[in-house]
């Protein structure tokens, strides 16, 4: 896909949907002796999600698994749309489309595994992380540089916000200007 078409897709995004395992986490599942599950989330990814929300872009989680850690993290980030346990992720996507009233081309989905491909094919912007399965990377319009659970969600957020002209108000809160010498890219 050429950069002009990608930019066009990015500018239409009004809702970003994240998979969890392998996208918001590194894909590892840590089990304790009592049978509890622990997940590692990246703080920069969480900040990127908050920036999207602050700019008026919706955020959601769509996961094939259920985990209490996801529920807790979603609550911390103020995510109101958290769909877990969707083995057929297209069913979750259909629910999001009904609930939001948005057209599919206004949605971005970030995934990493085969279960994500049907959703990626149904949205306007499909993003894969570099640690995604090869088939998933081929289905994506764009592959992030940062890996899942290691800044990929933040990269998606910043690229969308910059392309839509919504980055300047975010960084202005910190006394920065776009492209200025103090702005970290």
Image (tube, helix red, strand yellow):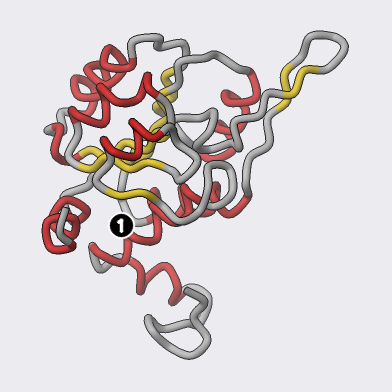
Question: In the image as oriented, which residue stretches furthest toward the bottom?
Answer: 181
Residue in the foreground of this view, choosing between 19 and 75: 19
Residue in the foreground of this view, choosing between 116 and 71: 116
In the rendered structure, the answer to whether residue 79 lies left or right of residue 6 reads right
In the rendered structure, the answer to whether residue 76 lies left or right of residue 62 reads right
Q: Check the image and report above or below for 70 versus 142.
A: above
Residue in the foreground of this view, choosing between 53 and 44: 44
Q: Check the image and report above or below for 11 versus 66.
A: below
In the rendered image, which quarter is residue 125 located in?
Answer: top left
Q: Residues within 10 Å of mark 1 (few under 14, many from 20)?
A: many
Number of numbered tags placed on the structure image: 1
Q: Which residue is mark 1?
A: 160
Q: Position of residue 157 (x, y in %)?
A: 39, 54
In the rendered image, which quarter is residue 59 located in?
Answer: top left
Q: Position of residue 41 (x, y in %)?
A: 63, 40
- Which residue is depicted at the point 40% across and 12% down? 86
Q: Is residue 15 visible?
A: no
- Which residue is depicted at the point 35% across and 74% down? 168
Q: Check the image and report above or below for 87 versus 56.
A: above
In the rendered structure, the answer to whether residue 125 lies left or right of residue 151 reads left
- Which residue is depicted at the point 54% across and 52% down? 151
Dot 1 falls on a residue whose secondary structure is helix
Question: In the image as oriented, which residue stretches furthest toward the right?
Answer: 33
In the rendered image, which quarter is residue 115 located in?
Answer: top left
Q: Check the image and report above or below for 145 versus 108.
A: below
Q: Position of residue 164 (x, y in %)?
A: 23, 62
- Which residue is depicted at the point 42% across and 26% down? 113
């Amino acid at each position: 896909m050429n950069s002009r078409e990608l930019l066009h897709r990015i500018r239409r995004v009004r809702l970003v949907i994240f998979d969890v395992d392998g996208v918001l986490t590194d894909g590892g599942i840590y089990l304790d002796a009592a049978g509890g599950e622990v997940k590692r989330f990246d703080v920069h990814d969480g900040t990127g999600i908050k920036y999207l929300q602050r700019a008026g872009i919706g955020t959601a989680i769509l996961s094939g698994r259920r985990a209490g850690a996801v529920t807790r993290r979603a609550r911390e980030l103020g995510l109101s749309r958290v769909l877990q346990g969707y083995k057929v992720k297209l069913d979750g996507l259909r629910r999001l489309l009904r609930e939001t009233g948005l057209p599919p081309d206004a949605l971005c989905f970030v995934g990493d595994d085969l279960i994500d491909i049907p959703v990626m094919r149904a949205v306007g912007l499909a993003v894969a992380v570099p640690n995604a399965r090869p088939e998933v990377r081929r289905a994506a319009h764009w592959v992030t540089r940062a890996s899942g659970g290691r800044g990929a969600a933040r990269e998606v957020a910043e690229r969308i916000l910059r392309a839509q002209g919504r980055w300047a108000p975010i960084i202005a809160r910190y006394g920065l200007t776009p492209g200025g010498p103090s702005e970290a890219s």
